[in-house]
Image (cartoon, rainbow, N blue to C red):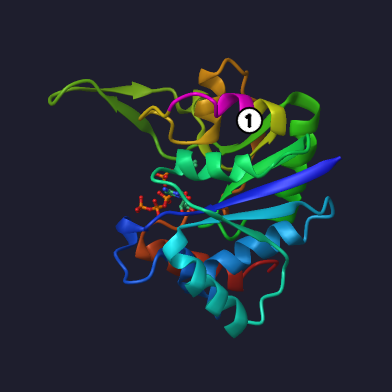
Amino acid sequence: MKYYAIIVAGGKGNRMNQAVAKQFLALDGKPVLMHTIEAFHKCVLNPEIILVLNTDQHRFWDELCSLHHFNIPHRVIQGGQERFDSVKNGLEVISENGVVAVHDAVRPLVSTALIQAAYEMALEKGNAIAAIQPVDSVRMKKDDQHSVALNRNELFLIQTPQTFLTAQLKAAYLQPYRNEFTDDASVAERAGFSIHLLTGERSNIKITYAQDLELASFLLKNKGL
Ligand SMILES: Nc1ccn([C@@H]2O[C@H](COP(=O)(O)OP(=O)(O)OP(=O)(O)O)[C@@H](O)[C@H]2O)c(=O)n1
Ligand SMILES: C[C@](O)(CO)[C@H](O)COP(=O)(O)O
């Protein structure tokens, strides 16, 4: 069986508000993105790594790879306007049937165990979507004055990897883009596929704001303690 990993790194990181996009910021001495690629490279299923990056960052990435002696084989693909477009571009270079994981470049703490479990579950069930349950109470806004409590036991916070049989994800991505497509599961669901949740990891945070980078650094240093 052939395994693929599409690492989406085509975003600008506006919420991080730094001169350099967050996927290139240093975490424990090397760019966030290198930690993410390493996690997939360590997986025994040996996924082919497809990195999706804006064209204007390809040269910068090459320079970073030289600087850090980063030699993990990977193919670099052009990013798109939306995350949806970046995933679609990544899928276009996959020709062989197999299993594909889509993972945010900015979730560098994903464990190799979760990556492998997601590939195995997707092979069996068609897809596997990493998710955790909220620990806070949750309410939904009804209007400017009112909100209503939701049952948090019925809610999930969705992470990546989001892993699929390649044929399923390719079929789903034939649809035109919609605003509500915030992840790959929403695209696949809209195309009519049932979504299968897999227990994610609390440490698998998405680096979005400056504090997240500090938290990632702490979690990385204390890994395995
Ligand atoms: N056009 C886009 C937009 C996002 N992403 C990637 O999708 C992941 C999740 O997106 P997000 O955290 O929102 O990243 P940004 O879009 O960079 O952040 P922001 O919304 O703050 O600008 C990131 O790894 C990001 O690089 C992408 O590949 N192509
Ligand atoms: C794909 C994702 O990380 C799942 O939680 C999330 O939907 C990405 O959202 P963003 O607004 O593009 O960061």
Question: What crowding class fits label 1: few (fewer than 14 Cα within 10 Å), some (14-19), or many (20 or more)?
Answer: many
Outermost residue, top direction? 192
- Looking at the image, can residue 100 be seen? yes
Q: Is residue 133 left or right of residue 141?
A: right
The part of the image, by quadrant, that contains residue 89 is top right
The stretch in magenta equals 170-176
Residue 152, horizontal then vertical, whole percent: 46, 28
Residue 218, given in percent of the width and then of the height, sits at 52, 70
Q: Which residue reaches farthest bottom?
A: 67
Q: Residue at x 49, y 28 (%)?
A: 155
Q: Amino acid at mark 1?
A: Leu
- Name the residue at 48% across, 51% down: 79
Q: Quadrant of the N terminus?
A: top right
Quadrant, the C terminus: bottom right
Residue at numbered disc 1: 169
Quarter occupied by residue 137: top left
- Residue 171 included in the magenta stretch of the image: yes
Q: Is residue 9 above or below residue 93?
A: below
Q: Residue furthest left?
A: 145
- The image shows residue 192 at horizontal and vertical percentages of 58, 15
